[in-house]
Structure formats: structure tokens, C-alpha cells
Image (cartoon, grey):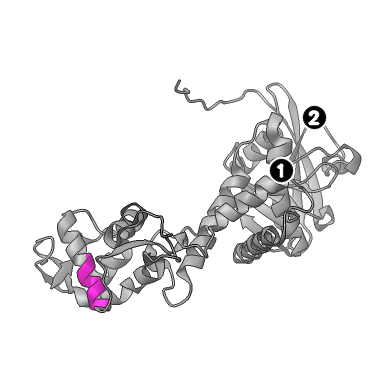
Amino acid sequence: MYCCENCFKDDFLIEVVESYDEIGKCDYCNSEQVFIVDMNELSQYFGIVKKLYKPLMIGENITPDDNILHAGEKLFDLFNDSWEVFYGFDPDAEEELFYDLMNSLDSTEDYQQLYAKGQDDYYHRDSVDLWNSLSQKLTKQNRFFPGRQGQHGQEEIDNIIDITKSVFYQQEFKIKKGYKLLRARIGEFYNLDELSSPPENIISVGRANPVGIRMLYCVSNEEDKEIALETAIAEVRAPASSTVTVADIRTNKDLTFVNLSDFERIESVFELNQYADPIAELDRNQLTSHYVSSLSKPILEDTAQIEYISTQYLTALAEHLNFDGIMFRSSIAKGINFVIFDEQNCDFWKLNRYKIEGLKYSIRELKL
């Protein structure tokens, strides 16, 4: 039977269908004069389904006490609810196409039984959950030895640290000597060294640094100069009518950062490698997304000392792995922040001073 470009919402599958360059009528959605393909040609791409979803099995993803009807779902519903591969032309025809594809791939399995996500089995714990558990321990139990609860707790911590290391190496970002940065400080200053990071005895808590640990907070000035300047000034929370001094900075050597300002989100299930470990790949992608969001999340000053502990831990891990700093999106402006662990890697070039003539506020009404 033939399916067509209109059967799918996923761009990858649409491109594959179009690549066969055959026009005709679809046997599933009944579209005419569209790109079609024998559905058997597409079944090879659906091997990923068998890696991501597993039949319900006692001891694997359910217990003897679980209600099977509540614990599992139809494979089609699990897959399409997660990835929206099919266009939505007709639920019954979509389901027929899906099971035809799966049976073409492997007709020996009963795809009509109930399934669960592979991430839901007893031997897998979601990386974001592991990180949230570690964050709780760091902030509320033991800041320096969070694995003290026993061997199992330490194994979980070792596991999330290993996954985080792989995230960091995947997000590695290299910059060349001479990379342009900005750094702002409220007040009118004329000496370059007055824009360096403060002495250890007066350093307050930051998103990347604990109290007393020097790190240089800057903003990238490599692309949009206006956004860079607005971000640098916004980051110091300069009040209206104040004067702000901004330093132009250049790196004096090649540096390597953990880039948590952005990442390649997995949008299509077919981006996953079905011949490796797609569950681990998806898990790592979700953890990266969580880290990117955490570092750019607005934090109230009243709760910052506690809220910043988990991001400080990430920063310390990056430094331990010999990265030169981290990058993340500003929570209050459009630019990208750089935290440089060793200020000696930067040269201060010149100072410019600005008068803050007004502020803009973005507001939304809270629902009662």
C-alpha cells in the first residue's frame, strides 16, 4: 500500500516520501496528485520505536500489583503523542498506517499489546530526576558530601555527574584569542582595573560563584553590539538616572567554554540513532535542556543564595574538568553571558560611560 506526504507531520519523513519523486493517490488518507511511496520503503526508519517503547512485563516496567490497563498504553498512542509524526488526517487510518509500518519492519511481535516508555522501566532513572534529587541534597541536606546517605545515593550522584560530563563535552565551545566581551559596573570609573572582579573578601553570591570566589562575569560583544551593551547594563540592575561604566574586554588566548546558552533540541524522533542507545541520547538532550533553562531562569534576590547552589555546582564541575568558563543566556536581556574562571585570560582595553535615562518593564497580570 502507498502512503503520501500528507500522511505525516514529521519533516524528515515528508522529505523521504518526496525523494521517491512519484505522484499518485494515497491508500491511507485518499489524497490525490501527491507524492507517494510504498509504505514498506519507510518501515526501516521505525526501528527506533522498538528501542524507545517496551511491552509491559512484570519485573521490568510493572509490578504484580499494577493495573495493566492503567500502567500501559497502545503503542500508536504512546509514539504519536510523544512525537506527532502523523498529520492528523484520520485517527483510524493513521493507526492502520503505523501498524502496517511496524509489521513490515518485524511481523513477529504483537504490537497490539500494551506498551510503556523505555524510560519507565525499573532499571532506568530519568537524568533530570537524578539532577533534581542531587540539587535537593545540595541545597537542603549536605552541601559538600551529598552522597553520605549510603552507597546507593553515591551511585546516583556518580551517575548524574558522568552524564553531566558528557553533556559538557557535547556543549564544548571554543573561542579564539581576541574574542570581544563587555563588562559593566554601576558608577563612574576611569581606571581599567576598577572593572575587574571584586576582591575575594567582598564578593557576593552569584549564579556561577559562591561567596568569596572570584569569577569574571561578561557579555559577548561579537555579534549585535546594541544587544550586548543593553545586556551588560541590565545585568548590573542599573537604576534610572545612574551612570554605568562599561569595559571593552578581549581574551588574550584561545579558551574553551561549556555553552549552556543554547543547544540542538531533538525535534524529530528520527534524529535519534536507533543503532546506538536512543534512550540515553534522548535523556541527555532533556538534561541539557534543563541545564540551559536553569541557568537562564530569573531568580529573586531574596532566594538567590539558595537557588544558585545547584548552578554553582555545575560551574565548579566545569572548572574541575578544565574548562575556562561557562556561557548562558541572560535572564533579563537578550545577550549571552560569559563567566570566565581566570581573569588573567582577559585584557581590559577601554572604558565607556553611559547615563541611564529610563527603564522598560515587561509585565503580565497574575490570575487569582
Q: Which element type, helix, strand or loop, lies under badge 2? A: loop
Give the CA separation, mark 2 to mark 1: 34 Å
In the rendered image, the quadrant that contains the C terminus is top left
Magenta span dominant secondary structure = helix
Residue farthest along the front direction in this orientation: 65
| Residue at x 60% of width, y 39% of height | 331
Q: Which element type, helix, strand or loop, lies under badge 1? A: helix
| Residue at x 18% of width, y 54% of height | 91
Residue 117 on image: x %, y %: 40, 61
| Residue at x 76% of width, y 55% of height | 148
The magenta span reads 98-105
Task: Please name the amino acid that badge 1 sits on.
Answer: Thr
**Label 2: how many residues lie within 10 Å, few (<14), some (14-19) or many (20+)?**
some
Q: Residue 175, relative to residue 333: is it above or below?
A: below
Q: Earlier in the sequence, mark 2 or mark 1?
A: 1
Q: 149 or 26, which lies in front?
A: 149
Residue tagged 2: 187
Residue tagged 1: 139
Task: Please name the amino acid that badge 2 sits on.
Answer: Gly
Quadrant in which residue 237 is drawn: top right
Residue 171 on image: x %, y %: 60, 62
> Can the viewer see residue 318?
yes
Q: Residue 238, relative to residue 9: is it above or below?
A: above
Residue 115 on image: x %, y %: 34, 62
Quadrant in which residue 93 is drawn: bottom left
